[in-house]
């Protein structure tokens, strides 16, 4: 009977040792992965901050869009005025040319 107890006890110790080694390997892998994640976080943090700074300006595009619309309408008015001035100058030039004949 004592032999059976010693065999079962020894087998249990061997199984516990194997399970402990498996758990230790898993803990080692978890710690290594955690270290890799922290290292990658340090690398990606400046990029994420840059993205945040660059995309923060997108909200101001609505203001830019409304200002651009105003600039366009003024540019159209200037163009129309320029055409009118060009037509008047051409008429004056024709009148002076006819008068000089």
Image (cartoon, rainbow, N blue to C red):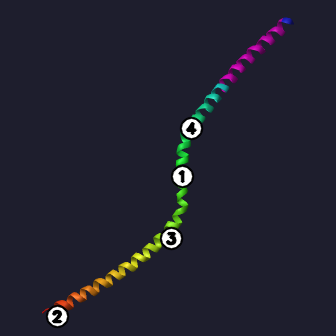
> Toward the viewer: 21 or 4?
21
Q: Nearer the viewer, mark 2 or mark 4?
A: 2
Question: For mark 3, what is the residue?
Answer: 66
Q: Is residue 19 magenta?
A: yes
Residues at discs 1 and 4 in contact (Cβ within 8 Å): no
Mark 2 crowdedness (10 Å alpha carbons): few <14, some 14-19, many ≥20:
few
Q: Secondary structure at mark 2?
A: helix
| Closer-to-camera residue (45/24) | 45
Of tags 2 and 1, the one toward the viewer is: 2
The image quarter containing residue 4 is top right
> Residue 26 appears in which quarter of the rendering?
top right
Task: Left or right? Give the position of 98 relative to 57.
Answer: left
Q: Earlier in the sequence, mark 1 or mark 3?
A: 1
Q: In this figure, which residue is indicated by the disc labeled 2?
A: 99
Secondary structure category for the residue under label 1: helix
Report helix, strand or loop for mark 4. Answer: helix
- Name the residue beneath numbered marker 4: 42
Check residue 53 in the rendering and tell me which mark sits there, or answer none. Answer: 1
């Amino acid at each position: 009977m004592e032999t059976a107890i010693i065999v079962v006890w020894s087998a249990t110790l061997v199984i516990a040792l194997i399970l402990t080694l498996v758990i230790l390997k898993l803990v080692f892998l978890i710690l290594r992965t955690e270290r890799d994640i922290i290292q990658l976080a340090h690398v990606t943090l400046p990029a994420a901050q840059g993205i945040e700074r660059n995309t923060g300006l997108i909200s101001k595009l609505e203001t830019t869009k409304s200002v651009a619309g105003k600039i366009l309408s003024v540019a159209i008015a200037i163009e129309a005025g320029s055409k009118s001035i060009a037509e008047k100058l051409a008429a004056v030039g024709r009148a002076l040319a006819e008068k000089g004949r």
